[in-house]
Image: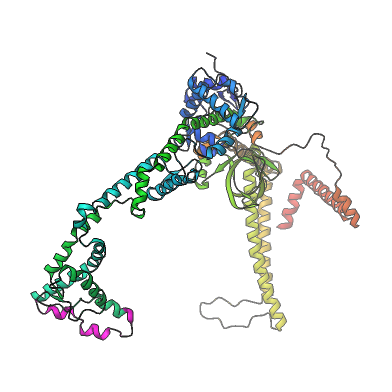
Amino acid sequence: MKPLVLQNYGGIHQLRIESADDLASIHQLHPARWAATSVQVESLQCDPAFLEYLNQDGSGTIRAEHLRVAVRWIFHMMAKNDRMAASSDVLRLEDLDISHEEGRKLKEAAIHILERLQVKNSDEISLEQVRIFRNTYGMTSPNGDGVLPPQHVSDPAVAQLAKDVLERVGGTKDISGEDGINEGHLCQFLDGARKHLAWKALAEDDGAEEILPWGDDTAAAVRLTSEFDAKIEQFFWQCDLVKLDARTAERIRLSEEALENLDGSDLRAMERQLAQAPLQTPNAEGVLNLRGPINPYYQDRIDELQDRVLTRARPDSHESLTRVGWQQVKAIFEPYRAWQADKPSEGMGELSETTLKEYLDGPAQKKLRRLLLEDLAVKDEVRQVTDLEKLILYQRWLLELANNFVCFSALYDPSRRALFELGDLIIDGRELSFTMKVRNRAEHKKIAQASKMFLVYAEITAPQEQGRSFEIAAALTRGGQGAIKIGKRGIFHDLRGKEWDARVVDLVENPISLGEAIKSPFVKAKKLVSDKLEAFAGTRAGALEKATTEITTKMEKGESLQQPAQVPSAGAAPPSGSGMRDLLLFGGIAFAAVGSSLVYLIKTLTDIGLVNAGLALVSLVLVVILFSALSGWSKLRKRDMSALLEACGWAVNFRMYMTRRLGHLFSHTPRLPEGTRKERRDLVTLFLRQTGYRAFRWTRVGLVSLLAALLTVALLSALWWNEIKALMQGWLT
């Protein structure tokens, strides 16, 4: 057995998978030694059909066992696998293993496809050719799925039968995406037709007299009887109440209050009231007098019931009706109701008996059954076409997937792209190549924060496709943050070369480099001081502006700047003087405070000494730098790329620490093309001369002179520091 080779990728030893033999050796390596044990289908950028074949359980996750099964299958089907290393989607037929029946059938299917496509070269078949065959010949019947759409049937009678089956029983989707029927649907339809005809036969011959006592008039009589059954029964129950207590008759009638509230102009209200009223005034005898006054709302239909049903059912007593008599009328049609209750529910009643008998005994159903069997007969051939596509996809993608699953060699190799990478984010003059798609930023961010990396979440949109957008997470692994902040815009190049707009929507801020970690406390201190100074200056400027405005307004109006004298009350503060006097007073106090502070500062420096003060300041700066460097170095060592994969749902076995060298792979400023020359001459100077402006050079000379003067003063101060201190102390005191 060939020994395994583990290669070093940034300090992590991972299995080398460069050939088919290397891929076959993954069975020797325990999954705990794999780079990952499960990956999310949605995060892989490859052929979707390949991922579906791998993830046949539909879980959305490809696990280690899925990859192992796929590797075993492809080595079982192929005798030669040298094209796997080339990621070829063209299969040589001589590479198939025809020592077993599966391999022979697969080769026969490939030859059949090439013949149908009229391809001259029958030595190899491509993925494109397999899909063309499936999408053309596979879209017509027979196609092996056992489903037959009516429009695929040429015989009109058979097509009509298939259509009736589809409408009455339902169907299923054909491979072509059209609705069709299968053997089960046809059997269900024919069984329903037999039941319907058998049910109809019960009302014929010997059973006709019992089920249809009035012949063709039975159905109409039953309809009228059923329509009035509830209302007539209600009347008899109301009569029972009156028989029990005569006062009930008054309650059944409309009360005085109801009559007063009844609006004679509201037709709908009157109609509702009549519909709820009894057929007739209830009586203790329980007799419905059909010759007496009937509720006008039901009068016409009661007359129809009397003429078409009661006169025929009770010719001697049809002018009145009792509960017993009504039960006798309904009993006449009870067999018909029971027969109707047993009616099959397949919806065959819409088809004539002649049509149903023709479907059962005629040639149409036999022809349709034969077409369904012919469709199923090519099922094995269609399965071979599917397996052929699967085999070519495995040859093309399986080795590459292993280099993004068993090991992550594709991630570290700059000449390749990992399957879970989306493309390159170009922003702030840099190219960020380690990018992954983010479905839920909030959930991703919770886990990704453990990576200790500086992450840029960007929204990617296509200008020409309104509404189409997605989000990515990009790792910034070297340099500094620069101008990257929320709202910063850039562009994104996906792996197919398409260009998108990019906008930063969120950040996870962490140290990017040691230099930036050292500068961080000084940048924060500078920002804090700057914010405080701006706030202080803003407050003082506002107060000064307010005071100036008040004085100017008084002067414009000719008012005196001195406030009027007031008699001080007991316990009150003495009145203030003029505004100018207060200003001078406050100015003197402020000057005295500044002077005192300066005296204290000079005295302190005198006690400490200039050299000691400088050494203390330098020591403080060095301590801050040291601790910042240690803290930054510690955080940079903990940067972990595997946390980004885990945030996308992966199960990663080892920590992928981001070293300084690896940082150059994923974030860099692209080099200039070979032979590019930089000119030192600043064209802005030339353009300024063309405008006639000459002050720029003199300004620069003046700044240099000022800097030299300041350095000279600093040098002289250092030489005569003691004399300067004594002079300043004497002057201030």
Q: Quadrant of the C terminus?
A: bottom right
Residue placed at 41% from the left, 50% from the top? Answer: 167
Q: For this view, does 81 lie left or right of residue 727?
A: left
Residue 639 visible in the picture: no
Q: For this view, does 341 lie left or right of residue 387?
A: left
Q: x%, y% of residue 194? A: 30, 46
Given residues 294 and 339, the one toward you in this image is 339
Given residues 42 and 79, the one toward you in this image is 79
Q: x%, y% of residue 512? A: 62, 39
Q: For this view, does 183 lie left or right of residue 41?
A: left
Work out whether 211 lies above or below 258.
above
Q: x%, y% of residue 157? A: 44, 46
Q: x%, y% of residue 577? A: 64, 77
| Quadrant in the rendering for residue 372 | top left
How was this image coloured?
rainbow
Magenta segment boundaries in residue numbering: 244-268
Residue 648 visible in the picture: yes
Q: Is residue 263 magenta?
A: yes
Residue placed at 30% from the left, 84% from the top? Answer: 263
Residue placed at 59% from the left, 20% from the top? Answer: 94
The single residue placed furthest to the front in the displayed view is 205
Q: For this view, does 111 lie left or right of residue 362?
A: right
Q: Is residue 260 magenta?
A: yes
Q: How many marks?
A: 0
Given residues 134 and 156, the one toward you in this image is 156
